[in-house]
Image (tube, grey):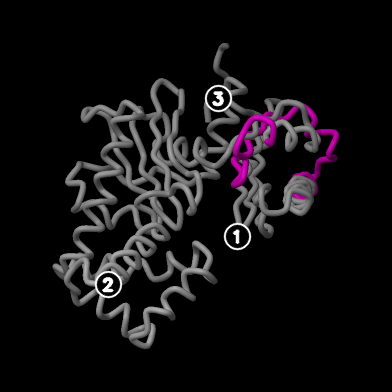
Amino acid sequence: MAHTNTDSNGPYLIGVDGGGTSCRATLLAGPNARYDVVLGPANVSTDFDAALDTINAALAQLAERAGLGMADLAQAHAHLGLAGVMNTAIANRVAAHLPFPQAQVTDDRPTTIAGALGEVDGALAAIGTGSFIGRQVAGQIHGVGGWGFYIGDQASGAWLLRRCLEEVMLAVDGFAAHTELSRAILKEHGDDPGQIVLFSLNSQPADYARLARDVVAAAEAGDPLGARLMQEGAAYIRRALDVVGWTGSEAFCLTGGLGPAYARWLNLPSIAPKGTALDGALALAARAAGVVL
């Protein structure tokens, strides 16, 4: 398809980045006509109907701000990267509730990768509360991981603290020697292993991730347990890079709240992310439309 530049008569481009905290949406109606909206959560696996209401409200606000009717957006090219889109069936279900036919719906991995790398070939390790690793080559995107705290998200903040608590309990039972980190965590729970058990039963991934910085800080200070867990997370990231086919000659980007913390443990040259997942959604919408941004 021939590439053209957007102009006032060109295709409308829409990008949506929907997650558990917020839904960000952008409309490009021309080279100098960008409209942005930020609304509440839009995780389609948590509450499908509420997420779709939020997404469609964001689209309606974009149209209003651009002085357009919803019918004017019927031919827009859109890419929606949404948390909770686990398979094609969910993506198709979302697409069926959108006001335009030319929409691509994916999880947030492709949009995060496209946003961070731009048009450059390379790989990305997105490490926050959850995690995934992906690669982009010639505009094609492939990702692994991101399966959630209970069965995946290795190297993530939630995973890091869960593994740390596991090691603390092993030390309590005498399988390993305590370190300053394990003693500090025990102290935070009143020196009562039972309180750690209760925390594990009653906490969400975000609760774990909020405390993961303690593990990172301990590792940086030389604590053996903290360092071993960071090395374990880094080993997973390296294996994942092999799985997606990353080569050392390609760009590599560490993103997310904890991504940069792994830099010293990976010892790989990395680049700063070029943009956000919302930028990636717009870029993917433009690719589908054959438009150069």
Viewer-proximal residue, 271 or 95? 95
Q: Which mark is residue 173?
A: 2
- Residue mark closest to the camera, 1 vs 2: 2
Q: Is residue 127 left or right of residue 62?
A: left
Where are the magenta residues, as a range? 61-90
Q: Quick one: SS at disc 3?
A: helix
Q: Which mark is residue 287?
A: 3
Q: Earlier in the sequence, mark 1 or mark 3?
A: 1
- Residue mark closest to the camera, 1 vs 3: 1
Q: Which residue is mark 1?
A: 21
Label 1 sits on what residue type? Thr
Residue 87 falls within the magenta-colored stretch: yes
Q: Quarter-wise, where is residue 4 in the image?
A: top right
The answer to whether the residue labelled 1 contacts the one labelled 3, judged by CB atoms less than 8 Å apart, is no
Q: Quick one: SS at disc 2?
A: loop
Q: Residue at x 61, y 45 (%)?
A: 84
Q: Quarter-wise, where is residue 165 in the image?
A: bottom left
Q: Residue furthest top?
A: 1
Q: Residue at x 40, y 35 (%)?
A: 134
Q: Earlier in the sequence, mark 2 or mark 3?
A: 2
Q: CA distance from mark 2 to mark 3?
A: 56 Å
Q: CA distance from mark 1 to mark 2?
A: 39 Å
Local packing at callout 1 (Cα closer than 10 Å; few below 14, some 14-19, many 20+) is: few
Q: CA distance from mark 1 to mark 3?
A: 27 Å
Label 2 sits on what residue type? Asp
Percent x, y of residue 109? 50, 39
Quadrant of the rendering where the N terminus is positioned: top right
